[in-house]
Image (spheres, rainbow, N blue to C red):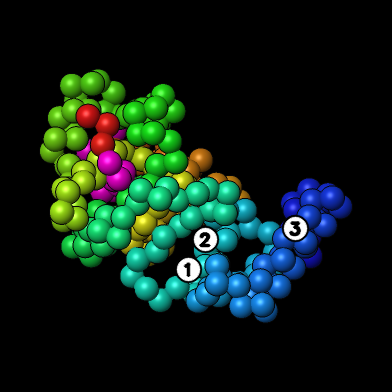
Amino acid sequence: RNWVPKTSRVLAERYASYRNAIEEMLRQGDPVLEGVEVIHMCRWGHLVGTVRRALDEVQTPFVMLHQHDLVVNDNLTTGQLVGILHCLAKLHANYVLLNRDVNCAGRSTQYFQAAPHRPDLWRAFVRRHLLCLNDGLATPLLPFIGYSDQTHIARAAWIRERVLPMVAERKCCMEFVVHEAMVLNWLHNPNVWEKTYMLGGML
C-alpha cells in the first residue's frame, strides 16, 4: 500500500528508504534504538493514525509523544521528567508540553495565551492553576488552555478518552481540531479545563 495519500513515486521511494534504514539499524543493534519496538502502519493514517496505532500497544499509564523532526533540548533534566510524572500520577495535570519555541516567543504567546483573552484574566488563571515540580528547583508548570502536537508527556487514558474522540475519524494533526475544541469548551464552561500545562513559565 502507498504511504503517501496522494501517490508520489519520489516520496514513496524516500519513505521506503527511511523504513529500510531503521530496520537495518535494528538488525545492527544500533544503541540509538536500544529497547525500541518499531510498529508499522498497515495504511496511511496521518499523525493521529500513528498515535492511535501506538496506543493499541502501550500498556503504561503515561506516554511521551515525540515527532521525529523535533529535538529534545539537553536542558531537560531527569528531575523535571520525574516531577512531571508525579503531577500526572496525582492527576494534577493531564498533559505537559515541552515547547519547541522559547515560551515567550511570539508564536507561543499567540497560541498559548489565546484564552483567557485579557492579560489580567490570563494572569489570574495562571496564578490559580500554576504548579511547581518537586525537582529541587521548583520548576514551574504553566497552565494553558488548548493543545499542541509538539513533544509532550501525558496520561495515556486522557489521550484515549479525551483527545482522540475529539479528532474522531479525521486524518489530520490532532492540534488542528483539539486546540480549538478545548478553547471553545472552556469559553462555554471554565470548569471543563483539561489541566494542560507547559514546562516552564511565561510570567
Contact? badges 1 and 2 (CB < 8 Å): yes
Question: Which mark is in front, 3 or 1?
Answer: 3
* Quadrant position of the C terminus in the picture: top left
Contact? badges 3 and 1 (CB < 8 Å): no
CA–CA distance in space, label 2 to label 3: 18 Å
* Quadrant position of the N terminus in the picture: bottom right
The residue beneath circle 1 is 55
- Res 99 → quadrant: top left
Residue located at (33% from left, 70% from top): 61
* Residue 170 in sight from this viewpoint: no
> Which label sits on residue 51?
2
Q: Secondary structure at mark 1?
A: helix
Q: Is residue 16 above or below residue 37?
A: above
Within 10 angstroms of label 1, few (less than 14), some, or many (20 or more) residues?
some
> Which label sits on residue 15?
3
- Res 37 → quadrant: bottom right
Query: Magenta residues?
Result: 187-200
Q: Earlier in the sequence, mark 2 or mark 3?
A: 3
Q: Secondary structure at mark 3?
A: helix
Q: Earlier in the sequence, mark 3 or mark 1?
A: 3
Residue located at (15% from left, 54% from top): 136
Place of residue 185 in the rendered image (x, y in percent of width and height, measured from the top left): 32, 40
Going by the numbered disc 1, the residue's amino acid type is Leu
CA–CA distance in space, label 3 to label 1: 23 Å
Place of residue 92 in the rendered image (x, y in percent of width and height, measured from the top left): 19, 55
Going by the numbered disc 3, the residue's amino acid type is Tyr
Place of residue 202 in the rendered image (x, y in percent of width and height, measured from the top left): 27, 31
Q: Secondary structure at mark 2?
A: helix
